[in-house]
Amino acid sequence: MRIDRLRTFMTRDRDRPRVVVAIDTDDGITGWGECYNHGPDRALPPVLDYLAPQLAGEDPTRIEYLILKLMQLQRFPPGSLVLAAISAIDHALFDISAKALNVPVYRLLGGNVRDRVRVYQGVYTAPDVEQIHDHCIRMRELYGLTAFKLSPYRIDIHANPWGKVLKTTADWVERLKATLDDDIELAFDAHAKL
């Protein structure tokens, strides 16, 4: 089995752009991966086009070898754009390998470690405490969810002094926690700003 081609697809998930990668093999297996969304997403397809010739004709099950090859192809250490592209390729190679062996990907990664994994829901669009409270309670009742990840910033983090951002954030979190039951836990996405 050899890599035949790499294809990219630009799509959207609500307000967020997505770049999806498909790697096709000469055996008819297609592996899928997704680039990490971090900003200049329209720049990712050309990066993937640049990396694709390095994969052509290679054995897709040699995942570590291929990722090292792509990393070492760079003249300087790769930045976030190249790493996002390589991560999607990594996902697609694992997908191909798992499909070829007729096993789930987690089996290739060492098997399951636990029988259950707690999940959280990302809640990024609710602008005020009441909406977030109502949403968390509704999700607990409907699906049993008790953990939620939020964007904590209430004011523009680039246009305000950092101390004001932190004070506003802390006040908002305190108000939110006061409305929620103790069984509901919150996590916060600092968006690489701390």
Image: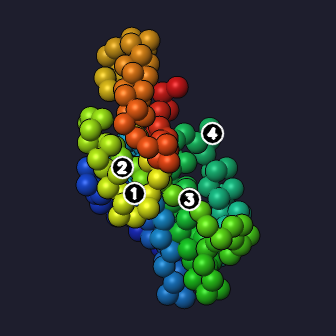
Residue 55 visible in the shown view: no
For disc 1, the marked residue is 140
Rendered view: 163 above or below 22: above
How far apart marks 1 and 3 lie (CA) works out to 13 Å
Q: What element carries label 2?
A: helix
Between disc 4 and disc 1, the foreground one is 1
Residue position marked by numbered label 3 in the rendering: 118
The kind of residue tagged 3 is Arg
Between residues 106 and 28, which one lies in front from this camera angle? 106
Asked whether the beta carbons under mark 1 and mark 2 sit within 8 Å of each other, the answer is: yes
Q: Is mark 4 on a helix, strand or loop?
A: loop
Residue at image location 25% in from the left, 55% down from the top: 14
Q: Residues within 10 Å of mark 1 (few under 14, many from 20)?
A: some
> Which mark, residue 177?
none
**Mark pair 3, 2: CA separation:** 16 Å
Residue 136 image point, x, y percent: 36, 49
Determine which of the numbered discs, if any, sits on residue 77 in the image.
4
Q: What element carries label 3?
A: loop
Q: Which of marks 3 and 2 is in front?
A: 2
Image-quadrant location for residue 179: top left
- Circle 4 packing at 10 Å, graded few (<14), some (14-19), many (20+), is few
Between 122 and 177, the residue placed more toward the observer is 177
Front-most of residues 157 and 85:
157
Task: Please indicate, yes or no, whether residue 157 appears anywhere in the rendered image.
Answer: yes
**C-alpha distance separating marks 2 and 4:** 42 Å
Give the amino acid type for the residue marked by disc 1 in the picture.
Answer: Arg
Disc 4 from disc 1: Cα separation: 44 Å
